[in-house]
Amino acid sequence: MKPKKKAVSKAVTKPSSNGDKQRFTLHGTMMSGPTYTVGLMLSLCRHPFSYIHVNLREGQHKQPDYLVKNRYGQVPALRDGQMFLVQSAAILEHLAESLKKFDGKTPMERIRVREWLFWQWDKLSLPVLRLRARNRGFRQFGDEVRTMYDTEAKAALAVLEHELAKSDWIVGKKPTIADIGIFAVVRYTPEALIDLTPYPNVGTWKKRIEALPGFGTPEQILPMESRLL
Ligand SMILES: N[C@@H](CCC(=O)N[C@@H](CS)C(=O)NCC(=O)O)C(=O)O
């Protein structure tokens, strides 16, 4: 079906001064945390983007025309001009470098930012997103595995809590893609049936991100249907 042309959501209505509004097209689904990560970054950068809904239920992500965009057969994929980028953490890094926003200020900060993004996928994302998928009925596994993921997710949240007790942001004095990537997992903890009360600094940091200009929820940033600019 031909994608409909739709109005841009509020979160992305103010383009950056050097913004070419046809530069980026995000392929993904609204329910996908990694798709939201990329949408949130573009929204916080105030950079408009076209959006193509990929229907995972119908297996569109495994079709040859999608696999040329994302060889792993997953969402998201981001078109930047002629180039397709995949893996949300790598996309965040590319956007931070090319838009010159939300990166570390010094070489050491930039290394730390990337360190946290690797940590996020190593320790936090998998248990939280698997528990969320189970709770929503997208994945089935028994209580033993559920307890294992729950323990792993809470251990990762304790590491984050310890770090955020020392400063407002994960790296340096300003929000970076480390905050954006990690936020886009932590926001799903209620759907993973994980209570954030024992992690008060994580809770305060989460509110700090939600107060940033350009912030939006997945529902505000990612439409249900395709949207071409
Ligand atoms: N590490 C990848 C994870 C992407 C991912 O897990 N995407 C899910 C949706 S949230 C997906 O496409 N699942 C379908 C599949 O793996 O076949 C990223 O950050 O982009």
Image (spheres, rainbow, N blue to C red):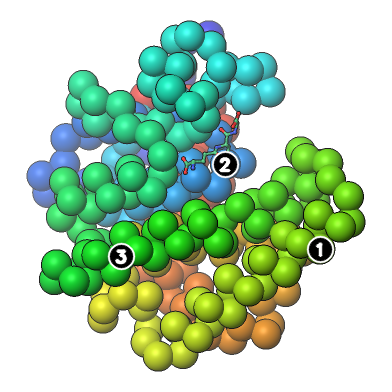
Packing grade of label 1 (10 A; few <14, some 14-19, many >=20) is few
Mark 2–mark 1 distance (CA, rounded to whole Å): 23 Å
Please tell me whether mark 2 or mark 1 is closer to you in this view. Answer: 1
Relative image position of residue 75 (x, y in whole percent): 50, 32
- Give the side of residue 14 with respect to residue 219, left or right: left
Q: Tell me which corner region of the image, top left, top right, bottom left or bottom right, holds residue 107.
A: bottom left
Q: Which residue is mark 3?
A: 113
Q: Mark 3 or 1 closer to N-term?
A: 3
Viewer-side residue, 87 vs 37? 87
- Give the side of residue 138 with respect to residue 84, left or right: right
Viewer-side residue, 2 vs 192? 192
* Residues under numbered marks 3 and 2 in contact, where contact means CB atoms less than 8 Å apart: no
Image vertical order of residue 111 relative to residue 62, above or below: below
Q: In the structure shown, which secondary structural element does the residue marked by tag 2 occupy?
A: loop
Q: Mark 2 or 1 closer to N-term?
A: 2
Packing grade of label 2 (10 A; few <14, some 14-19, many >=20) is some
Packing grade of label 3 (10 A; few <14, some 14-19, many >=20) is many
Mark 3–mark 2 distance (CA, rounded to whole Å): 23 Å
* Residues under numbered marks 3 and 1 in contact, where contact means CB atoms less than 8 Å apart: no
Give the residue at x 61% y 83%: 199
- Can I make out residue 13 in this image? no
- Give the side of residue 159 with respect to residue 110, left or right: right
Give the residue at x 24% y 31%: 80
Disc 1 residue type (three-letter): Thr
Please tell me whether mark 3 or mark 2 is closer to you in this view. Answer: 3
Q: Which residue is mark 1?
A: 147
Q: Which residue is mark 2?
A: 32
Disc 2 residue type (three-letter): Ser
